Every structure is written in structure tokens, then in C-alpha cells.
Image (cartoon, rainbow, N blue to C red):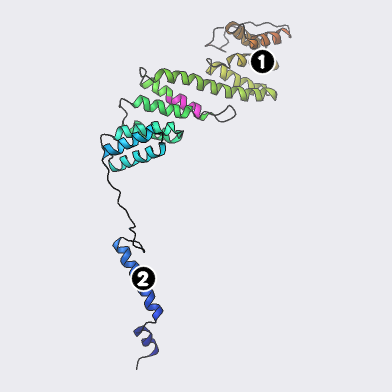
Amino acid sequence: MLSRTEGIFARPAPAVRLLAAVLLALTLTACSGFGLFGERKIVEEEIIPAEDLYNEAIGYIEQGRAKSALETFQKLERQHPYSEYAEKTRLLTVFVQFGAGQFDEAILAADRYLALYPSAQDAPYAMYMKGTSYFRQIKDLTRDQGTAQDAISTYERLIENYPDSDYAQQARENILIAHDQLAGKEMSVGRYYLGNRQYTAALNRFKVVVEDYETSTHVEEALERLVECYLALGLVREAQHAAAILGHNYPSSQWYQDAYTLLQSQGLAPQAQDGNALGSTLSG
């Protein structure tokens, strides 16, 4: 006669038998590569010829379907990483991401292209697109201007490495605009300090504009603001010198008229001072 324990193991209960059957079915289906309901868990990607994928992506670009184009380029790279279309695909990825406003992604794609093809014929274009991706993200004057500096650095590298490229001149023009943006930031901070009578801090900001961003549109105002700061600090000769530079370079400027009037109110007049380095790049 079997013991109670031996009887349990010898004759499983119906519920136990059902559970064992289900577990066995799951194990068999998992091993066979199919899910519980017969669907395949891992579907192998169909390999499509590189040329077909490339032409498909170009078609999406022409239709303005950036997302589809990028997905197709990714598939092309995944399936044919060393095909004759690989370089074009990576360059066009930069182009499509830039056009879609995905500037950070375009910068990364440009870096990748330049790392893989540093001597390629289209390397100047990739570098230009990288710089312009930064350039398009330049924020308003109240925000951090790191992207403006990144744009300038990239453009300067482009001009240095490819001075005769088709993109060098446009890079130079964009640098001027970026410099103007940085100068505007300095002016904004300088005006804040000036309004709070923090004259030394304000003066330093305005000097940066005059000495580092002499081609910007803010130089006239910066020179007039320097006259204000110098007079407030009792630095009369420096105030006269700043006004003299302003009058020599921008004689018809309203900022010069304001500086001249301010000096005149204290019985002073613009006068250049020998040995004063302010505005050395400007004629004074």
C-alpha cells in the first residue's frame, strides 16, 4: 500500500497535469522560434539591393518625406555598410537632417562623415553644414551664446582648411553675423551694469565689443557707453579718447553726437591720447 506522499507523486492532480502541459507547450514553441499564438518572434530583415534602397531614399527626399528618407538611409547603412553608396548616404543624411531642422543630429552626422572621409571632395560641404547647424541655433541676446561661438569656430576651421571652397565666403559672412550676436550679448550685459551704476563691470563689457568685435554694428554705441563709464569713474582722458575714436570713425553717428554733448556738458571735448590702446584696430 502506497503512503499518502507516494500517492500524490504517483498520481498528479488534474490541475497539476494541466499546468505541466501548458509549460511544455510554451517551452516547445519558444524553442521553435514561434510565440504562444504561432507568430514568429524574430523576423529576419529582407535584404534589399543597395541601389534600390538609395533610389528609394532619394525619392523620399524629392517628396519631402524626411523621416522616410532617413529610415531608408539607415537601412542601407545597416545592410550594405561598405557599398558604393555608403559615402553619399552619410552625406545626404546630414543634408536631410539639416533640412528637417534636426540641427543637433545634423552636427553629429557631419562629424561622423568628416571622421570617415576627411579628404573627400564633399568634406567642405559637410563642415559648412555643421557650422550652419550651429548658426541656425543662435538664440536671442538674453540667452547663452555658446552656439554662436561654436558656429564661428567651425567656420574658421572651414576657411583655414578649405580657403578656396565654394562655402568659404558664405562662412566669412556668417562669422560677421555671429560676431554681431556675441557683441550684442556683451552690450546687453554692459547696459545692465551701467543701469545699476556698476561702472567698472559695464566698462569691461563695452571694451570687449570695441576691441574684439570691431566689425559689429554695436561699436558706435559701445564707444559712447565707454565715454559714460569713464566720466562716471572720473577717467577724463580716457573718456576724451573714446569720444575721439567715435568721432573719427562715425562722425555722423547719433552716438557721437551724444558723446560730444556729454563731454561738452562738463567743459570737455574729444581728444585722442597717445599710447591709449583702446580701439587699436579702429583709426583714431
Which image quarter: residue 139? top right
User: 10 Å neighbourhood of mark 1: few (<14), some, or many (≥20)?
Assistant: some
Front position in the image: 122 or 270: 122
User: 10 Å neighbourhood of mark 2: few (<14), some, or many (≥20)?
Assistant: few
Q: Secondary structure at mark 2?
A: helix
Tell me which residue sits at (33%, 67%) in the image.
27
In what quadrant of the picture does the C terminus appear? Answer: top right
Q: Residue 128: horizontal and vertical position, in percent?
A: 40, 25
Q: Which residue is mark 2?
A: 23
Which image quarter: residue 140? top right
Identify whether 24 is placed above or below 93. below
59 relative position to 229: left or right = left
Q: Are marks 1 and 2 in contact (CB under 8 Å)?
A: no
Q: Residue 207: horizontal and vertical position, in percent?
A: 58, 18
178 relative position to 192: left or right = left
Residue 263 visible, this angle: yes
- Give the residues in magenta: 147-154
Identify whether 47 is placed above or below 25. above
Task: Tell me how far mark 1 sits from mark 2, CA to CA.
Answer: 87 Å
1 relative position to 84: left or right = right
Q: Residue 3: horizontal and vertical position, in percent?
A: 37, 90
Tell me which residue sits at (43%, 19%) in the image.
170
Q: Secondary structure at mark 1?
A: helix
Front position in the image: 53 or 132: 53
Q: Amino acid at mark 1?
A: Tyr
Q: Which mark is residue 230?
A: 1
Residue 110 visible, this angle: no
